[in-house]
């Protein structure tokens, strides 16, 4: 490809609209341009990267036995009503009517469509297992699209769906996809972790997220230094306390009594006032669900993990109660809630089971209780309800946990029968009995993978593409283009590298060396070959490795070997 002919509009300055580095660099390197909020055009440089990532995905999906299809982006509401998600999905689902006034949506995901296809085509266990994948544009009307391709509304996704006869076979399909994902992200040159994750709105029973490690990541993850446990912080289990309160402590427990705490409402205010540490206080939080109000107790220095709570009490809506409900439930102003005397369910975090003589709200204005003990109120249930902290050990082996930030680029789910039962996707087993198909689904955000790769691979001068997904492997950069000798040798080198099968970009623009070098660093091609008046006289080429900044002079005859060597390591 010739730079002079390519639509490659680089920018000198960081665009004001971009907050994260990948967004800045994708705009500056002329990879993407915004059309509307969260909707981007992908220019030739980016398209080449997309093609490479998609090729890796295709190869690995096919190696794992999946078959490529293309499912419609425009989807009728009927199948979404059958799955129950037409009502549940909320405003992220972009809905519209066709000329016959029938409801449609732009597909944010394809469980309904693929399950509809399968229920029509699969009859017998002999047709299973089956795994279908596609690489396609999806639309989710995100409330706050941001960070360029990291969180946009229209995006390219690889999604795959597996169909199996039973749980064991479904687990095998899941494992095959898990292994394929490991290979895909390794081949893309990414530093990532597969972490246990919550199943979210897609539903299902079990899932892993693939997280590219980056400080700018929106997700917090924990991973064990000693074993292979890793989880999204939303999901990370807290190891239950392994000792009970001993009898001696029990015998020394005191009687609860009121203390006046005028105007002291927050954990900080109350513990400062009473001159105790926050871990001596139990917070009482009133939550409202679509069914009931519940009280949730956690230690003062701990935070409720609302995803764990939602999973535990199995409700659709869950939120902290508003002031009116708190006042109605506790008969006290906000800030003085406590468990004693409450007539709603009380759910308590495991850590509280270790506490004695603690402080709670008094359910009375300006009042707290001290020396409260677990026998003073009725706990309906103890459970793991809190956000893991850096004082917690690994829930599997007790080892030390590390906290990191990650960008979710892939997600694998075991869906079970959620969609096959809702839409009636069944097969006849060997005994002629009708059974529901067991499903799994597997996504990769292609654009987000590219953005994550840039978050992880850049320096102050620009992008440093991993070789496997770089838009070009080699860039030929002639300076002193006005000298016919330099121009001819550069052209000859460009042609010969192309003949050898390399992706090559030649910067044949009539620009100053400074501009050319700056653009070359910005667009991050792994190897830059510079030809000048001087090098062409000696029949040498200057080779610069983008990742290491290493510059070496190479004899023309050794050039192919050197390029091969450096491409392997960058
Ligand atoms: Zn561990």
Image: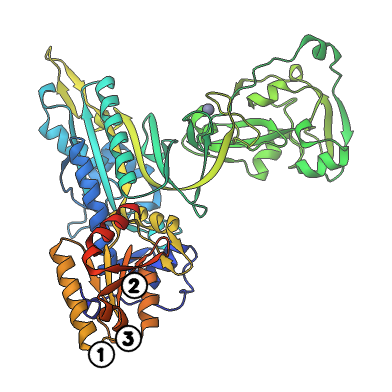
**Sequence-first disc among 3 and 2:** 2
Q: Nearer the viewer, residue 444 or 138?
A: 444
Q: What residue is shown at x 29% (from left), y 30% (from top)?
A: 174
Residue picked out by circle 3: 511
**Other-residue count near label 1 (Cα within 10 Å), few / some / many at <14 / 14–19 / ≥20:** few
Q: CA distance from mark 1 to mark 2?
A: 27 Å
Residue 359, quarter of picture:
top right
Find disc 2 in the rendering and name its residue.
30
Residue placed under numbered mark 1 in the picture: 482
Report the Cα–Cα distance between label 3 and label 2. Answer: 17 Å
Vertical order, 460 against 406 (above or below): below
Characterize the local packing of mark 2: few (<14), some (14-19) or many (20 or more) Cα atoms within 10 angstroms: many
Of mark 1 and mark 2, the one earlier in the sequence is 2
Return the residue nearer the eye: 417 or 9: 9
How far is mark 1 from mark 3, CA to CA? 11 Å
Q: Decide if residue 416 is on the left or right side of residue 435.
A: right
Give the residue displayed 40% in from the left and 77% down from the top. Answer: 11
Q: Is mark 1 within 8 Å of ligand 1?
A: no
Front residue of 90/493: it is: 493
The answer to the question of whether label 1 and label 3 lie on touching residues, with beta carbons closer than 8 A, is: no
Q: Secondary structure at mark 1?
A: loop
Residue at 13% x, 22% y is 125
């Amino acid at each position: 490809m010739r730079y002079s002919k390519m639509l490659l509009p680089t920018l000198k300055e960081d665009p004001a609209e971009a907050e994260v580095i990948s967004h800045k660099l994708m705009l500056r390197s002329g990879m993407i341009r915004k059309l509307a909020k969260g909707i981007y055009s992908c220019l030739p440089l980016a398209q080449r990267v997309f093609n490479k990532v998609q090729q890796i995905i295709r190869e690995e999906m096919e190696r794992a036995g999946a078959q490529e299809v293309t499912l419609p982006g425009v989807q009728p509401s009927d199948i979404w009503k059958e799955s129950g998600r037409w009502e549940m999905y909320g405003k992220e689902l972009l809905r519209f009517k066709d000329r016959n006034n029938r409801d449609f949506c732009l597909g944010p995901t394809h469980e309904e469509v693929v399950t509809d296809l399968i229920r029509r085509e699969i009859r017998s266990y002999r047709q299973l297992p089956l795994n279908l994948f596609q690489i396609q544009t999806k639309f989710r009307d995100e409330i706050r699209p941001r960070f360029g391709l990291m969180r946009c509304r229209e995006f390219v996704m690889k999604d795959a769906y597996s169909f199996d006869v039973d749980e064991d076979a479904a687990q095998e399909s899941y494992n095959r996809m898990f292994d394929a994902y490991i290979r895909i992200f390794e081949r893309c040159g990414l530093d990532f972790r597969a972490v246990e994750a919550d199943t979210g709105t897609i539903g299902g029973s079990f899932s892993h997220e693939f997280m590219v490690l980056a400080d700018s990541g929106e997700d917090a993850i924990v991973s064990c230094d000693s074993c292979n446990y890793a989880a999204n912080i939303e999901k990370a289990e807290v190891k239950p306390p392994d000792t009970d309160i001993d009898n001696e402590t029990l015998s020394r427990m005191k009687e609860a009594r009121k203390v006046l705490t005028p105007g002291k409402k927050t954990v900080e205010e109350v513990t400062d006032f009473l001159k105790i540490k926050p871990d001596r206080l139990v917070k009482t939080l009133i939550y409202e669900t679509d069914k009931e109000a519940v009280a949730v107790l956690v230690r003062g220095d701990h935070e409720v993990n609302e995803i764990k709570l939602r999973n535990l009490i199995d409700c659709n809506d869950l939120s902290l109660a508003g002031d009116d409900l708190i006042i109605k439930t506790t008969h006290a102003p906000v800030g003085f809630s406590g468990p004693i005397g409450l007539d709603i369910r009380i759910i308590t975090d495991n850590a509280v089971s270790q506490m004695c003589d603690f402080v709670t709200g008094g359910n009375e204005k300006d009042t707290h209780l001290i020396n409260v003990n677990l026998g003073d109120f009725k706990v309906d249930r103890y459970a793991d309800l809190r956000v893991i902290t850096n004082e917690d050990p690994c829930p599997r082996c007790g080892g030390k946990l590390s906290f990191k930030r990650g960008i979710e680029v892939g997600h694998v789910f075991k869906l079970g029968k959620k969609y096959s039962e809702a839409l009636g996707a069944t097969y006849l087993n060997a005994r002629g009995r009708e059974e529901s198909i067991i499903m799994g689904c597997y996504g990769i955000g292609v654009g987000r993978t590219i953005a994550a790769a840039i978050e992880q691979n850049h320096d102050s001068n620009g992008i440093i593409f991993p070789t496997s997904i770089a838009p070009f492997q080699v860039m030929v950069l002639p300076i002193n283009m006005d000298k016919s000798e330099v121009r001819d040798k550069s052209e000859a080198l460009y042609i010969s590298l192309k003949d050898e099968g390399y992706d090559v970009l030649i910067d044949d623009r009539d620009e100053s060396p400074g501009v050319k070098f700056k653009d070359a660093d910005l667009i991050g091609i792994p190897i830059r070959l510079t030809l000048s008046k001087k090098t062409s006289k000696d029949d040498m080429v200057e080779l610069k490795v983008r990742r290491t900044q290493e510059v070496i002079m190479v004899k023309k005859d050794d050039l192919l070997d050197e390029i091969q060597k450096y491409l392997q390591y960058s």
